[in-house]
């Protein structure tokens, strides 16, 4: 009887030790997963931090290229600036950092654009749209790193409807017809 009791106690101890071992292994696995996740987050943060610091360098390079006269494109300094931009673009692509631009007439989106000043409406930029881009925006893996800095045209955006588009086409046809008639009249006068 004592022998059976002793065996039962030992079996219970073995069961207890197996459970402890199982819990320890699960905890070790969880710690490893947490550590892997923390390392990944640290890398992401590092890449994002460095990228944000380099945006001003890209802005300066873009400004240099924008203000280069066509006749100066082959100048060694301009060639070097283009090479720098290419190298920066290559590094950004490697780490999934993407530059995005906007153009006049695009609809202002406060989630992607930072309005820094207002400007009057034009044919290209009606009310509620972007009038000009000052600095491009940046994102990484769908996450906004820097909003595009833009000039906005104040007012409520009204998307063109089918009637407006048809009126624009009709106006364009009418203008073309008048221009054609004017050219024909000019040709008749000269003949």
Image: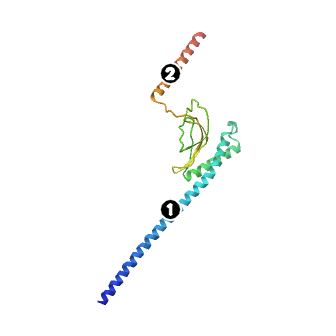
Judging depth in this view, the residue of 39 and 17 nearest the camera is 17
Residue bearing the label numbered 1: 37
Instruction: Answer with mark 1 or mark 2, whichever residue precedes in sequence.
Output: 1
Residue 71 placement: quadrant: top right
Is 82 drawn above or below residue 187 in the view shown? below
Which residue is depicted at the point 49% across and 65% down?
Answer: 34
Mark 1 Cα shell of 10 Å, populated few (<14), some (14-19), many (≥20): few
Residue at left offset 59%, top offset 10%: 189
Residue 170 visible in the snapshot? yes
Residue 51 placement (x, y as % from top left) = 60, 52
Position in image of residue 112 (x %, y %) = 54, 44
Q: What residue is disc 2 on?
A: 173
Image position, residue 63 (x, y; %): 66, 42
Query: In this image, 8 relative to 86: left or right?
Result: left
Badge nearest the viewer, 1 or 2: 1
From the image, which quarter does the C terminus lie in?
top right
Q: Are marks 1 and 2 in contact (CB under 8 Å)?
A: no
Q: Which residue shows up at 55% across the image and 14% down it? A: 184
Disc 1 is placed on an element classified as helix
- Quadrant where the N terminus sits is bottom left
Measuring from the top left, give residue 82's x and y in whole percent.
65, 45
Badge 2 local density, few (<14 within 10 Å), some, or many (20+)?
A: few
């Amino acid at each position: 009887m004592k022998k059976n009791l002793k065996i039962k106690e030992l079996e219970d101890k073995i069961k207890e030790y197996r459970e402890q071992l199982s819990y320890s292994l699960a905890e070790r696995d969880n710690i490893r997963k947490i550590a892997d996740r923390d390392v990944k987050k640290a890398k992401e943060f590092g890449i994002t931090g460095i990228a944000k610091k380099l945006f001003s360098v890209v802005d300066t390079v873009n400004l240099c290229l924008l203000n280069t006269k066509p006749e100066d494109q082959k100048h060694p300094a301009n060639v070097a600036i283009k090479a720098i931009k290419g190298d920066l673009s290559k590094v950004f692509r490697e780490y999934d950092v993407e530059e995005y631009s906007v153009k006049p007439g695009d609809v202002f989106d406060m989630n992607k654009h930072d309005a820094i000043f207002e400007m009057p409406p034009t044919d290209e930029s009606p009310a509620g749209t972007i009038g000009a881009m000052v600095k491009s925006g940046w994102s990484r893996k769908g996450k906004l790193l820097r909003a595009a800095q833009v000039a906005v045209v104040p007012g409520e955006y009204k998307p063109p409807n089918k009637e407006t588009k048809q009126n624009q086409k009709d106006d364009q046809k009418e203008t073309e017809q008048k221009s054609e008639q004017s050219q024909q009249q000019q040709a008749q006068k000269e003949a």
